[in-house]
């Protein structure tokens, strides 16, 4: 039944044999199939340079599905039905003439369906560029030369959109020559995560929080995006990017925007994106003089990760032993506007930290007049902990009286806990890519990043990178399996605060 409500789509997947497609996109499509969320006539044309045939590609995808989909969610019948939607076409992305084959694929399908007596006049076309960003421009131009797209075509691109502001403008200009902004779906997969979406519900559906969400009531905010993994064989890409480009410019700043933005007037893509842009424009620049107290960059050395010894960044396979690329960044961020004046956002993200954990902690100010045991004063502020992963949920730390006759009015801090999977008995929380693909098929842009967001984020990040390049200080060392360089603890302690897990 659901099927009838879903747009029928022809999806051209460029880079279909690459890591992203195999690890994330095909498993996400499979899950949509399993949930009955792919229209009967939707199909995928997998495009890459390798000279193999559809049968071999289907076999390869099946093996990856078996690997990446949890065993309890893997259903061979569904997987095989899904694979019938996939065809493979070898394609040289640089060769304009070879793009004509794409039209033939589209036309053949339409003719076939007309032979069936169906009245449909063509599926929506989605072009998914799961290829290196340097290829976006050439793919777009060749699609245009082959008259392969029309004004309804949706085009999906992945990060990184450039390496800095200037290179991101080049990519955005190239895409903009062929497509309008309303056709472009720039992915930041954090926006597809369940709890990230829930930030909007939490903030704008609960007046309780809406009325407390400013400098009058909040003392500071922490955002931690920690990973226990290292760079997982991606040295070539990662060493040129580093943690600030790989994680802060996109995922972490997006989280910060959702926490800090003003209420949008509705849920439309542009209302939300307009508010996010205002936050990005209000980020205070970090000057060279501020670097020491506002920025910490680190690089992991050998250590222990989840009980196993692991090499340092410079000892990873393929490493340049003299690399000064950072694998950890902590920043103190200030937002120059009425709502957030005087409220620092402490953000940190790193590889080879003790666990995979993404969380946001809102520290509320203490009550204006304190009447309890002076020894317990440090307890006296509420905290809202928003867990993005793992165990998606929220926890509000409130103060109550300790139970028992002899305890008097001793305070105790305890959680009001909401773990989504337990509270709502959800069978499974969909992966970010499932939601993003689903929104792309529906043509809804609100979870995708607009050009100006990308560019404001780059221009803020660029000035930090410029300062540390000019300053010439190498990153500080931290042992794998720890929470980053001690300087990141010093950064927050200097303000009389501590990272949540140290408190
Ligand atoms: C990607 C980064 O965008 O996000 C990776 O390039 C990082 O380096 C990944 O590991 C983290 O995503 P998630 O969803 O696992 O937190």
Image: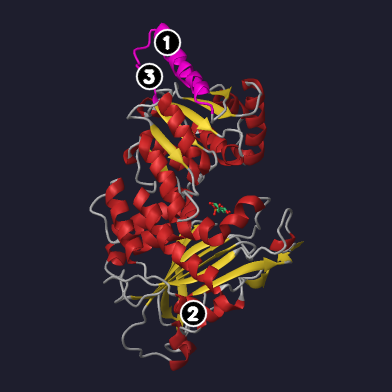
Viewer-side residue, 22 vs 432:
22
The magenta region covers 95-124
Q: Residue tagged by mark 2?
A: 293
Is 132 on the left or on the right of 290, as rendered?
Answer: right
Q: In whole angstroms, how far apart are the C-alphas of marks 1 and 3? A: 9 Å
Q: In the image, is residue 397 part of the stretch drawn in magenta?
A: no
Is 365 on the left or on the right of 298, as rendered?
Answer: left
Toward which corner of the image does residue 380 lie, by quadrant?
bottom left
Q: In whole angstroms, how far apart are the C-alphas of marks 3 and 2? A: 58 Å
Above or below residue 240? Residue 94 is above
Q: Residue at x 33, y 38 (%)?
A: 180
Above or below residue 40? Residue 265 is below
Residue 62 screen position, x and y as percent:
64, 30
Residue 94 screen position, x and y as percent:
54, 30
Residue ranking furthest to the right: 309
SS under mark 3:
loop
Residue 103 screen position, x and y as percent:
45, 19
Viewer-side residue, 71 vs 167:
167
Residue 126 screen position, x and y as percent:
43, 31
Q: Residue tagged by mark 3?
A: 122
Viewer-side residue, 49 vs 127:
49
Specify the quadrant that holds the N terminus.
top left
Above or below residue 239? Residue 467 is below
> Between disc 1 and disc 3, whose residue precedes?
1
Q: Residue tagged by mark 1?
A: 111
Q: Does any atom of ligand 1 lie closer than 8 Å to the CB of label 1? A: no
Residue ranking furthest to the bottom: 374
Q: In the image, is residue 108 part of the stretch drawn in magenta?
A: yes
């Amino acid at each position: 039944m659901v099927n009838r409500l879903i747009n029928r789509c022809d999806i051209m997947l460029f880079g279909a044999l690459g890591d992203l497609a195999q690890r994330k996109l095909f498993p996400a499509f499979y899950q949509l199939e399993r949930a009955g969320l792919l229209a009967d006539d939707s199909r995928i044309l997998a495009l890459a340079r390798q000279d193999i045939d559809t049968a071999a590609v289907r076999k390869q995808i099946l093996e990856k599905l078996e690997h990446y989909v949890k065993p309890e969610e893997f259903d061979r019948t569904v997987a095989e039905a899904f694979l019938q939607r996939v065809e493979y076409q070898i394609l040289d992305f640089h060769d304009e003439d070879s793009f004509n084959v794409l039209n033939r694929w589209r036309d053949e399908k339409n003719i076939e369906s007309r032979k069936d007596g169906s009245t449909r006049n063509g599926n929506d076309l989605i072009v998914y560029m799961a290829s290196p960003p340097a290829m976006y421009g050439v793919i777009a131009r060749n699609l245009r030369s082959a008259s392969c797209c029309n004004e309804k075509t949706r085009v999906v691109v992945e990060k990184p959109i450039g390496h800095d502001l200037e290179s991101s403008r080049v990519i955005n200009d190239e895409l903009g020559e062929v497509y309008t902004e309303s056709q472009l779906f720039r992915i930041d997969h954090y926006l597809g995560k369940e709890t990230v979406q829930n930030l909007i519900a939490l903030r704008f559906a609960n007046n309780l929080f809406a009325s407390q969400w400013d400098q009058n009531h909040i003392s500071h905010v922490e955002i931690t995006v920690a990973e226990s993994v290292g760079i997982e064989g991606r040295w070539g890409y990662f060493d040129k990017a580093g943690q600030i480009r790989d994680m802060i410019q996109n995922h972490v700043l997006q989280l910060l925007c959702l926490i800090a933005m003003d209420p949008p007037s509705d849920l439309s893509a542009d209302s939300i994106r307009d508010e996010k842009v205002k936050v990005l424009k209000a980020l205070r620049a970090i000057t060279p003089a501020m670097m020491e107290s506002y920025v910490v960059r680190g690089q992991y050395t050998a250590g222990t990760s989840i009980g196993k010894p692991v090499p340092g960044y410079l000892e990873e396979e393929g490493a340049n032993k003299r690399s000064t690329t950072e694998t950890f960044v902590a920043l103190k961020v200030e937002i120059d506007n009425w709502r957030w004046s005087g409220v620092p956002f402490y953000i940190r993200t790193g590889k080879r930290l003790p666990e995979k954990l993404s969380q946001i902690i809102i520290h509320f100010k203490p009550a204006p007049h304190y009447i309890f045991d002076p020894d317990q004063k440090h307890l006296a502020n509420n905290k809202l902990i928003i867990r993005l992963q793992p165990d998606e949920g929220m926890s509000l730390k409130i103060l109550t009286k300790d139970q028992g006759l002899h305890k008097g009015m001793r305070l105790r801090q305890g959680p009001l806990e909401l773990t989504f999977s337990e509270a709502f008995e959800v069978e499974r929380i969909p992966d970010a890519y499932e939601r993003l693909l689903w929104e792309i098929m529906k043509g809804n842009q609100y979870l995708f990043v607009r050009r100006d967001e990308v560019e404001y984020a780059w221009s803020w990040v660029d000035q930090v990178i410029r300062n540390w390049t000019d300053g010439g200080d190498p990153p500080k060392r931290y042992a794998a399996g720890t929470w980053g360089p001690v300087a990141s603890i010093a950064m927050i302690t200097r303000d009389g605060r501590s990272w949540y897990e140290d408190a």
